[in-house]
């Protein structure tokens, strides 16, 4: 079994103290399995980002995968944009993730169109872009810095281009919020996570992953200047939005 396919059991045994969740080697080793068993619709979202990129990527422009982890989005874009002469820029500030993604890219012989950067997305300059994707990454950025990042993305996109934003969200209505979280946990249980794993992971993510509401996301995107903002995917408390400049 390769590192990429190792099963996630990071929170399987009881911990007396739960550290804040970080994207280190132990997480990177099991990350592929973690996301597939934790995000309802993850595979569909990746595949549909491929569809969106295929439709909107313009020849000779740049496509960004901000918070690229092991490159699921990067690889899907690369697969769908052959002969488009686009540069795909994958950015992540976790050395553990970047190291593994660099190896995946090298092993695939795809170095030419893909550039992997160890960089904080708060410092990323977006330019000449036709597709920018943040797949479950804005949720890890401090609340007061989110609007500035979205503005940088908007400014760096060419007219008619797209920004795809996927996020775990919160609901303003308490009973709906409870229902959606409950269903997400049910999804995780059916994918082999125990109640202990679910609860310890939840504690580790407290104040690390901070979900906004759908309304906040949509308003922030419109405020940055995006004219068309559409939620194209939702499953429980996970959504994906496409914003067209
Ligand atoms: C996927 N998109 O498979 N700068 C750069 N990277 C960051 C920052 C930051 N400030 N904060 C967090 N990250 C991927 C999944 S995971 C989602 C994205 C999750 C990185 C972090 O290191 C991690 O690799 C990624 O964002 C978030 O489609 O774990 O829920």
Image: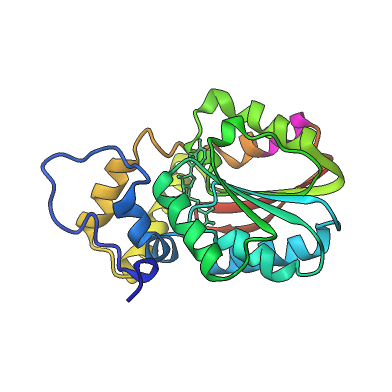
Region of the chain picked out in magenta, as a range: 218-224
Residue beneath the point at 83% across and 48% down: 161
Q: Is 220 in the magenta?
A: yes
Q: Is 84 in the magenta?
A: no
The image position of residue 182, as x and y in percent, is 37, 55
Q: Is residue 156 left or right of residue 203?
A: right
Say whether residue 242 is visible. no
Residue beneath the point at 57% across and 36% down: 121
Q: Is residue 29 left or right of residue 85?
A: left
Instruction: Point out the image quarter for the N terminus.
Output: bottom left
Residue beneath the point at 30% across and 63% down: 8
Front residue of 91 and 207? 91
Front residue of 140 and 131? 131
- Colour approach in the figure: rainbow
* Residue 1 against residue 241 in the figure, above or below: below
* Residue 141 against residue 200 in the figure, above or below: above
Q: Is residue 203 left or right of residue 122?
A: left
The image position of residue 66, as x and y in percent, is 60, 45
Say whether residue 6 is visible. yes
The quadrant in which residue 36 appears is: bottom left
Residue beneath the point at 33% across and 53% down: 27
């Amino acid at each position: 079994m390769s590192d990429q396919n190792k099963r996630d059991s990071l929170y399987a045994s009881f911990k007396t103290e739960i550290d804040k969740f970080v994207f280190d080697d132990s997480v990177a080793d099991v990350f592929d399995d973690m996301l597939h068993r934790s995000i309802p619709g993850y595979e569909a979202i990746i595949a549909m980002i491929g569809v969106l990129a295929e439709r909107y990527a313009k020849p000779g422009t740049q496509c960004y995968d901000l918070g690229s982890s092991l490159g699921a989005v990067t690889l899907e874009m690369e697969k769908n944009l052959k002969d488009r002469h686009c540069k795909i820029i994958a950015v992540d500030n976790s050395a553990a993730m970047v190291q593994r993604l660099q190896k995946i890219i090298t092993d695939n012989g795809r170095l030419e169109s893909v550039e992997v950067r160890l960089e904080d997305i708060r410092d990323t300059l977006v330019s000449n872009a036709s597709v920018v994707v943040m797949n479950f990454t804005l949720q890890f950025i401090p609340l007061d810095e989110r609007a500035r990042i979205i503005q940088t993305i908007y400014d760096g996109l060419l007219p008619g281009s797209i920004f795809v934003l996927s996020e775990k969200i919160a609901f303003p209505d308490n009973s709906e919020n409870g229902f959606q979280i409950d269903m997400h946990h049910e999804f995780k249980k059916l994918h082999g996570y125990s109640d202990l794993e679910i609860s310890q992971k939840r504690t580790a993510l407290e104040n690390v992953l901070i979900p906004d509401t759908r309304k906040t996301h949509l308003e922030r995107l419109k405020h940055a200047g995006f004219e068309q903002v559409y939620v194209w995917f939702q499953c429980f408390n996970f959504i994906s939005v496409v914003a067209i400049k």
